[in-house]
Image (tube, helix red, strand yellow):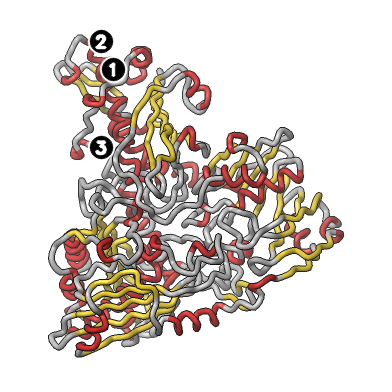
Amino acid sequence: MFPPIPLFKNKETEDRSKVFKASRRDFLKLGSLAAGGLILGVNFQCSGPKGELITFAPNVYLSINSDNEVTIIAHRSEMGTGIRTSLPQIVADELGADWSKVKIVQAEGDEEKYGNQNTDGSFSVRMFYEPMRKAGATGRIMLIKAAAAEWGVEPSECDTANGMVIHSGSNKKVAFGDLVAQLKEAPLPAEGEIILRDFSSYKLIGKAVPIYDLKDISQGKAVFGADVDLPNMKVAVVKRCPVIGGKVVSYNEEKALAVLGVSQVVKIEGSYPTGLDKALEGVAVIAENTWAAMKGRDALEVEWDLGENKDYSSSKQMAEMLESTKGDGKVRRKRGDFDAARGAAAKVIERTYEVPYYAHATMEPPTAIADVKADGSCEVWAPSQHPQWARGAVATALGVDAAQVKVNVTLLGGGFGRKSKPDYVVEAALLSKAAKAPVRVQWTREDDIHFDFYHSLSAQRIRATLDGAGKLTGWNHHTVFPAIGSTSSLTEVQPSDGEMGLGCVDFPFDVPNIRIESHESKGHVRIGWLRSVSNIHHAFAMHSMIDEIAEARGLDPIENYLDLLGENRDIDFQSEIVDGEYGNYGEKIEEYPWNTDRMKNLVREVADKSNWKGNKEAGKIMGFAAHKSFLTYVACVVILEKDANGNISIPEVHYAVDCGVGVNTDRIKSQFEGGAQFAMSLATASEVTFEKGVAQQSNYDTYSIIRMPQSPKEIHVHIVESSIKPTGVGEPPVPPFIPALANAMYRLNGKRIYKLPFKV
């Protein structure tokens, strides 16, 4: 089985990519690529949590055929982020391809063929930017050499553009496709010959390129999970125990089988703790169509043993967590002596912050199709963020080798981390085996919200000390929340180093006395990662307090932020981490440092672009926050208005973004526009609560997301131009928006916000 994803353990950052010419055996495995042309593979070596090598496999295949068509296999999952466009875009730009003749084919989930395919954690571009460039450059050099030999000229006199090799001296041109025969016999260029283009020469990288699937999506032709239709396919829905950890005592299938179209009722065995990749305990109804399956489930009679979580109350746990923050916790980071700073303080500010459970609530609820054959092999179609994990989980559930499982990846109707967990794919495989036919498992919206891998509820207490001169002398941050690890192990009662490194121990301000502590909390529901993970609650608390400190110091929030960052420097958090590791999102801190100068420049950028000073003088209501997450620096300004009837709106949001090389500016802006909407929902609308172990919300009528009238009217995304290696943009929009909005609300009504969600 594919192992669960470690939260940001350091990985090998050295570029060990290698380009190779695909063999006939490789080609036979890759029927999606055109026959008769050149096929190049790209190896990219990754390492595991302890640095051990876990794969050395071709991640991407690039082919050029005699019709001048360039085909690139996209090995990441597309869920609206544009990654299926952005990575091939890098290859095509280095190659000099005609983008209109580039064909993108989705890879199946196969570690041997494609290496790491986990589309999560905002690391796809940063991981593959250099290998993709190298792949394109290798093809370009081979094409140039072939054309130069034909013309009897020096390769240095030639270049590629728009699918042609061009000789600068004579303006001779030849299409890529006309060189395929020579390329098939040509050797690969030596490592030293692979020269990457200057950034200034790119025509696609750093530009706004529409997503490859745009036409199919807009015309309703794109294939998402539930669009897959196989001959003789059945549809299944599952009645799951309403309380996590419960078991089936007995069930009566008679009434369910009496529903027209229902063919079978099957029990699914579950376990507790549930883990991240196993099916929940339940009883499935298999039918000829979705409606029959749902009606059959309604008629199904099940007696449950609700298990140890049957009395669980989220409000009671929140009260317990808040109480625990009053005592000493496990020290996770220490600098100086906070107690001494507190004893000498002229002013102490102490605040607590509460954040509820959040559901992913993706537009497309989980669904998967499986077809288990008589020989035990299985083919899957699924909107999966992590098809290799799905493949391993299915193999384990069926008791077969992973080589007997094929996972086809469809487009995803949203992911946010939910669809990296393969529990719903396992359900489909188990039910297909029982039905001896292809089966599509369909989760309803109620299933989705009742049985999600939730973003954990959290409680925090922060104490800040100021001296007589108004200097911030001490910072004590207590945080408590059920950890993601609690989903797999009941003994995991402390947040992991990875979770603590998401907006908590990476407190960047130049304060002489820092003590950061965590507290124990047990998991009672399934906890998972959701867009920006623990940055959600940590950034809300940290930057709300920083804004309150600015007021106590009599400083403008932006002036305060810049002052607290201190001197320009790279911050090494590891030296102050107590009995743990600072993960830095899986990258070495020296390769991706926390640089205060980059953040200062970004804060000044958002102040300028939002007209902070002018708007402040004009009396406009504004809130500010700046936060680094997933190695990307983001500063945010939210502007509020209140009309004569007391209605509050958001006329403008300004983001300044430093993500290194912005590969596709169209997708970066889209991610931040969507991120603002997502964060707005978390801040003002969304919440899951539990009583007697059962989620009290069930659909969009009770688990609210913002509607268009509540949405920010204009979202301006100011991308800082950079040639520094790229970082992620899927998750970084969320953390700074929530405190920026909360800080603006304080300036509007004079009330600080310490609990999410709040009313706007």
Q: Residue 59 versus residue 286: which sits nearer the camera? A: 59
Q: Say left or right for 727 vs 528.
A: left
The C terminus lies in quadrant:
bottom left
What's the residue type where badge 1 is placed?
Val
Mark 1 and mark 2 lie on one chain; the one further toward the N terminus is 2
Dot 2 lies on which element? helix
Query: Which residue bears the numbered disc 3?
Result: 203
Residue at 20% x, 65% y: name it. 603
Q: How far apart are marks 1 and 3 (CA)?
A: 20 Å
What's the residue type where badge 2 is placed?
Glu
Question: Circles 1 and 3: CB distance less than 8 Å?
Answer: no
Which residue is at the far front? Answer: 579
Dot 3 lies on which element? loop
Dot 1 lies on which element? strand
The image shows residue 222 at horizontal and vertical percentages of 53, 43
Q: Is residue 403 above or below residue 255?
A: above
Q: Which mark is residue 174?
A: 1
Q: How far apart are marks 3 and 2 (CA)?
A: 27 Å
Query: Which residue bears the numbered disc 2?
Result: 150
The 10 Å Cα crowd at callout 2, few under 14, some 14 to 19, many 20 or more, is few
The 10 Å Cα crowd at callout 3, few under 14, some 14 to 19, many 20 or more, is some
Q: State the image quarter where residue 597 is shown.
A: bottom left
What's the residue type where badge 3 is placed?
Lys
Instruction: From the image, state whether disc 3 or disc 2 is nearer to you.
Output: 2
Instruction: From the image, state whether disc 1 or disc 2 is nearer to you.
Output: 2
Q: Say left or right for 85 vs 467.
A: right
The image shows residue 460 at horizontal and vertical percentages of 39, 77
Question: Circles 1 and 2: CB distance less than 8 Å?
Answer: yes
The image shows residue 664 at horizontal and vertical percentages of 32, 46
